[in-house]
Image: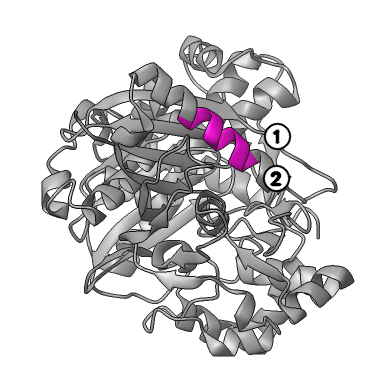
Amino acid sequence: MENYVLGFDIGTTGTRAMIFDRKSREISSAYSEFRQYFPQDGWVEHDAVEIYDVTLKMAAEALKKGKVKPKQIAAVGIANQRETTVIWDKNTGIPACRAIVWQDRRTLPICERLEAMNGEKFVRQTGMIIVPNDAATKIAWLMENREEICHGLEEGSLIYGTIDTWMVWKLTGGKVHITEHSNNSVTLLQNAEKLDYDEEILKVLNIPRHILPEIRKSSEVYGYTEPEEFFGASVPIGGILGDQQAAAIGQGCLKPGTAKNTYGTGSFIVMNTGERYIAPSNGIFSPVIYTKDNLVNYGLEGMADVSGAVIQWLRDGIGMIQNAEEAEKLAQQAESNMGVYFVPAFVGLGAPYYDSYARGTLIGLSRGADKRHVARAALESMAFQVRDSFEMLEKKSGMKLTRLRADGGGAKSDFMLQFQADILGVPVERPEITETTCLGGVYMAGLAVGYWDSIEEVSEFWRVEKSFEPVMTESQRQEQITMWTKAIERAGGWLK
């Protein structure tokens, strides 16, 4: 009976379960969104119990579609939205509050306080920039603003974890409380070179160490699914990666100087720097891509909080389109953007600006502009944000990026990827499997149980589906960049 590896991609807006065979071929998949909560301006929350329930439901659906029995699963791998913070009762398993999502901006005052204390030192030590995304500041906020949670954390009845920690704890019936290096590297909690919790950060933010999960490697067996939780089967959970590092692995970006961008809810460009740790600066941070055995693989990353979510906003926010395909068709109908630029700073600007006071801006409208130009500007904004980080990655690493590998839901847009190649001036490659985030977690799990022999073996599975070559002239490119920069300037600091 053939065995398979099951992967979960637990993103910001939904969960995908996928089953793969030894040749990295997709057997089946299932996807469902889960609810987003916006209780106040700048606040974003999830129901952690709903995330777990939806994930199990998608697992059941993928197993059914693929006609795979639970006992045929050789290992489970997890790729997850990073920094989203869950606090729960270790005895009952009930969350103390909704999870605070990585996009949430309520901790900005804490970030500013940290910056004023010794910000550059903390960034250098942890490899993570000080932004409201950080899980460390979310724990601090809860302890400062929720008395009952502060009491529970101090006495030890409540414990903390990111989504990977929560999922493993639930799947193992509360037996395993862990995280791993790639997820922990972007929380501001982990010392970048020691790969252990940074005691200075814990002290400054008054975070009790006993609430924190044990830090493990990205590829090893952490525990086994509780049969009552996982369809009657005890299956090893063997790999975990933060979703962006997972996408880099799934894209085969295993050599220094290779890079990918994931166009999901946000946009995340990750460049592999090998075993070399390069301290963050200029809005670019330095995550661990993965750890296995004695190997530590570092990277550089630039992030935009809103990418594909801008298309979701056109659909759900203002009802301009019914689906993403409609945005693509509208954009292709416009011969140019007619001077219209869309800065999707709904929760601020990401790399290299990191301006939490910026807000979304649609600028350059004339009487002749219509929804075709707005749709085009929205898709172009996804590519412009990547270009801003792309340039900074080259400067920091000293390496010339000769191509970019693209994945995520937004990578299905031919229009956007062609514009991406044009605005970067390098080829952009889309793989046969665009859901490479799930694939990265699958590879880590398979390697942990010997399903595959080496990281080099799985890197050979990557296959290009389509390559987009730049056709824009240099003068056209510079004109577009100049106008985008002007739009960014106008969106910046809006709330100030």
- SS of the residue under disc 1: loop
Viewer-nearest residue: 152 or 328 = 152
Residue 331, how many percent across, how many down? 51, 17
Which residue was labeled with disc 1?
Answer: 35
Horizontal placement of 264 versus 471: left or right? right
Residue 299 appears at what percent x and percent y? Answer: 33, 64
Q: Is residue 152 left or right of residue 212?
A: right
Which picture quadrant has residue 75?
top left
Name the residue type under label 1: Arg
Q: Position of residue 345 (x, y in %)?
A: 65, 45
Q: Pointer 2: residues within 10 angstroms few (<14), some, or many (20+)?
A: many
Q: Residue at x 74, y 66 (%)?
A: 107
Side (left or right) of 157 relative to 441? right
- Residue drawn at (45%, 69%), measured in percent from left and top? 185
Q: Compared with residue 315, is residue 19 higher up or lower down, i.e. above or below?
A: below
Instruction: Pick whichever, 286 or 355, lies toward us.
Output: 286
Question: Badge 1: how crowded within 10 Å, few (<14), some, or many (20+)?
Answer: few
Name the quarter where the N terminus is drawn: top left
Residue under label 2, please give it: 46
What residue do we see at 26% from left, 31% from top? 431
Above or below: residue 155 compared with residue 172: below
Colouring scheme, one of rainbow, by chain, secondary structure, one colour:
one colour
Q: Are marks 1 and 2 in contact (CB under 8 Å)?
A: yes
Q: Is residue 52 magenta?
A: yes
69 in relation to 354, above or below: above
Percent position (x, y) of residue 495?
80, 55
Is residue 277 in the magenta section?
no
Q: Which residues are magenta?
A: 51-59
Q: Residue at x 25, y 74 (%)?
A: 276
